[in-house]
Image (cartoon, rainbow, N blue to C red):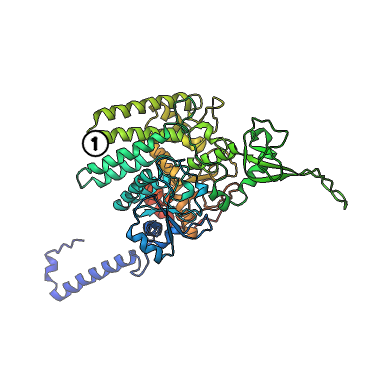
Amino acid sequence: MSIQVSKASRSFPAATFRCFLLLIVICGAFADHALAAPADAPEAPGLKPILDYISSAWDTLTRSMTNCESFVDPKMKVAPLLYLPAGYAEPAEVQKLAVDCNVRVEHLPVEIHRLGEIDTAKIQPHGLLYLENKYVVPGGRFNEMYGWDSYFIVRGLLRAERVELARGMVDNFFFEIEHYGAMLNANRTYYLTRSQPPFLSSMFVDVYQAAQKNGRPDKAWLERAYADLNKDYEMWTREPHLAGQTGLSRYYDFGDGPPAEAVQDESGFYRKVAQYFFLHPAQADDYVLETKPGSNQLGSNQAVSTPPVAGMPYSLQVCDVPLTMARAECEKARQFKLSADYYKGDRSMRESGFDVSFRFGPFGAATHHYAPVCLNSLLYKTEKDLEQISLWLGHGDDAKKWNQRAEGRKKLITHYLWSGEQGLFFDFNFQTNRMSKYQYASTFYPLWAGLATPEQAKAVVGNLKVFERPGGIPMSTEETGTQWDLPYGWGNIEMVAIDGLRRYGYNADADRVSYEFLSTVAESFRRDGNIREKYNVVTKSSEAHVELGYEMNVVGFGWTNAAFLELLHGLPKDMVERLEKEQDQPLPAAK
């Protein structure tokens, strides 16, 4: 405010003029005070509570070989046991934890160079596998360092500027490759039969670039990465991980029969599987076979060529429905078991990470018969990453080799896995020589990896409406009662899909889907103060009515925490502000 004093006003007494000015100042101050919030009014929290939760979770979910909590296995009722690689010198901190945590320490019976070299059933009791560095676990029943979870967790750690912790996790995976034969599903002995989706090269490249922003290239780390990534890649590109004659790869667990952790932790699951196949014989595909009571031998009516059986026996008995007080008449009970081929598919489904879904047939039973779009997109990305690492190392000839492999895989993916008619990527059953028709969120992987042509990406984005729901992108368009199908959305796959949309310039779609999922997670957090592994994107809630497979919705949760940070970072400022204001509104009625 400016005040002009006329010549006439100069005739006022000085004291009168000072009072006049004081009155103006007081009135102005009173007006400002009337417009401002009371000094003791609390600020609206906005996103601060959920961001504080995520920030603290990186530490509460961190495990190490000096942390007694690391040895607890909610999936197994066994005493704490740590296994070191065969012939590996026992570190001093391990000797100390044996006393501090009452942990038994043993060495694996043999050196492991490749998956499948050791029969995990002979490692009794099961225990934790040693790793050199700290790592972040997903949470809840998942109290180990998981393969594909860790890629998304590392993305979150880098966003939180926890570079050293992220680098330590990458080095742990190199340790697994060098001492346990591959990047494992997770570091427990019962996981020594399988890997998980190969995100490791992406993990390394992201951490390497973050670590080198303020430093010089670390050639020794590049060389270690090149050797270990190449070894892990070779596992996926030789038998038994080859998808028939397609030139593509498949998921394949080296173990047989029901996996130990599923038998102990997923009570009644295989009984439900057997019941489903009893009631849907057209889909059973010889997965349920009659056996002689008390043995693993097939009944006399089974052909000699029928595959063997495994697991627990189940009985089937047909009885009349009693309409009176009289005793119901029944046929003699017959005994059945699930086939060994079913369990191979079940185990391979677990290597895929998508356990359980009907994507590869009911309960994923035919997983090992498919060339999956997710796995082959990841191997294309691995080939491109190894091309880049070769260039960083100055190995031009190697870079050309990796580029040729990537281009060859891209052509095979288009040939076998792309449907121009549907405008989506699908999996390919190399046994029946048919492309799947199961619409699945893995269709976004080729966009994430950068292998889709602009025309393919446009077609996939044109089909976004097929998937999109109020809370984001669900895994499929089929509601099967399993957690990796409709109506569930998962933070890691939201990240893959949204990264893919942004890579091809579809930012408006990416912003919209990001907001849908972020608001779902944030609203659920306001209700119970937790972040969970999956969300119902139809009802925009954390309700989980999973009927088949493990039924809980685990709290933690590593990759959802990371997804929240990453998706929030990608949103335009005005949408972030809108999301913040949304958190300060009264909660809508629970759905």
Q: Name the element at disc 1.
A: helix
Give residue 114's quadrant in the image.
Answer: top left
Measured from the top left, where is residue 225 in percent x and y? Answer: 30, 41
Would you say residue 419 is visible in this rendering? Answer: no
Q: Which of 361 and 158 is in front in this view?
A: 361
Name the residue furthest bottom: 15
Residue visible at 19% across and 70% down in the picture: 21
* 129 with respect to 421 (left or right): left
User: Residue 365: x, y in percent?
Assistant: 58, 37
Q: Which of 22 and 51 is in front in this view?
A: 51
Left or right of residue 304: residue 381: left
Q: Which residue is drawn at 44% across and 35% down?
A: 375
Q: Residue at x 37, y 66 (%)?
A: 42
Asked if residue 208 can be seen in this view, the reply is: yes
Q: Residues within 10 Å of mark 1 (few under 14, many from 20)?
A: some
Depth check: 70 or 499 in front? Answer: 70
Q: Which amino acid does label 1 sit on?
A: Trp
Q: Residue 433 is drawn in which quadrant? A: top right
* Residue placed under numbered mark 1 in the picture: 392
Is 15 rendered above or below residue 276? below
How many numbered circles does the render carry?
1
